[in-house]
Image (cartoon, helix red, strand yellow):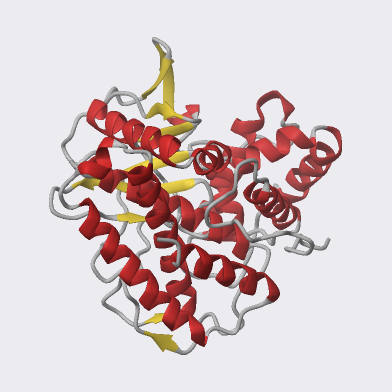
Amino acid sequence: MKRPDAAGLALDDLTVPRPGSTTLREVWSRALRGALIDLLTLTPPAGSASWPSMRAALLRLAKAQPGALFSAIRLPSVGTRIRCLRDPSRDDIDRREVFDGLHAALADALGAAWTGPPPPVGVSFTSWPRRAMWRDGEWVAADGSGPLFFDVGGGVVLCRADDSPLALHEAHPDKDGNRASLGGELVDAWAGGLRRALEAIEVALPPLHQEMTVALRQVVPVGFYEEQHLSASFRENLGTAYVSLHPQDITMVEALVHEFSHNKLNALFELDPVLHNAFSPLYSSPVRPDARPLHGVLLAVHAFVAVATVHRSLRRVGHPLASHPSFGARLSAIEQGNAQGLQTLQNAEPTDVGRALLDELSRLATVG
């Protein structure tokens, strides 16, 4: 089976969508089709006797109920595990544990449509009922510690627990993983901060907010900090953003736009390498203390160009967030960093897809 690529896509508004844009929807759809192919062709861990019957059930579903199967693959509990398992030589995960979790998550997500073997007993995973019980209109943690998931609008949920195989992997020198934590704050504070940020994005750039309703599924809390902000996302974990809570709403706006932008670019990486020299040599980054490959510089610039565009839109519509005394200085700092990052990206050797993306970034960065 041939995996989807970016052939025929018009990718001149993947960073900031135009009104009515379908660019992200098409990129996301193709990335999901790629995940389906990865699922049907994966190499299971040694000794996985259930895989032949699992695969047969998945093939039947792909023909009879493709919509149900794609809906399951969209879930972070399913899609992330598929992408983690597609490389049989990967040694930074417990393949047996990830495979058993995928089996359980698929069976749970598909419900009555699942005709494959039952999942192993005792396998747990979050985001879905097996780790919770339904009470008073919400999923509540089985240990009685309170609700696991909270609707914050636009189809996005705050996920209080996370068992992604990659959650504790960390590439940033100033962080130590992404453990789910409310940081001692009440859930209402988290939900309120996220809702206000999403509402501000909708006012500033409605097409970007519309994209979020399509692709962003869950925000995982990673603590509360008054003096800094921490966030992360992973290529394998499409639809998820790890975000810390900050007392300033504009910082939460930045965080959501930033991590969602990473999600968009990560979906594109499922279809195209974007840069031929993405991972070597290393270059200085405008936003990181460590030297970075151009892949990392591109991720940063793509995210911060979107953040700068949202800032300018907030100012243009007269949003209260734009009246903060530090707003102008922050926007100037972001724009300066974007200019430095674009200068570094002049060393890039882009694919045709990458050239369209770099052209868009240059165009947006020059808008005052």
Q: Nearer the viewer, residue 142 or 30?
A: 30
Q: Position of residue 338 (x, y in %)?
A: 38, 70
In-image side of 155 versus 18 (left or right): left
Question: Could one spot residue 273 in this view of the protein?
Answer: no
Q: Is residue 362 above or below residue 283?
A: above
The quadrant in which the N terminus is found is bottom right
State which quadrant residue 86 falls in. Answer: bottom right
In-image side of 346 versus 160 (left or right): right
Q: Residue furthest top?
A: 136
Which residue appears at 51% of the width and 44% of the height?
A: 208
Q: Position of residue 291 (x, y in %)?
A: 34, 82
In-image side of 368 versus 63 (left or right): left
Q: Position of residue 141 (x, y in %)?
A: 35, 26
The quadrant in which the C terminus is found is bottom left
Q: Nearer the viewer, residue 263 or 253?
A: 253
Q: Nearer the viewer, residue 294 or 185?
A: 294
Q: Position of residue 107 (x, y in %)?
A: 64, 34
Q: Is residue 130 above or below residue 104?
A: above
Which residue appears at 68% of the width and 46% of the height?
A: 22
Which residue appears at 85% of the width and 33% of the height?
A: 64
Q: Is residue 108 above or below residue 140?
A: below
Which residue appears at 45% of the width and 62% of the height?
A: 367
Q: Residue furthest bottom?
A: 281
Question: Could one spot residue 32 in this view of the protein?
Answer: yes
Q: Residue furthest right?
A: 63
Query: Number of callouts in the render?
Result: 0
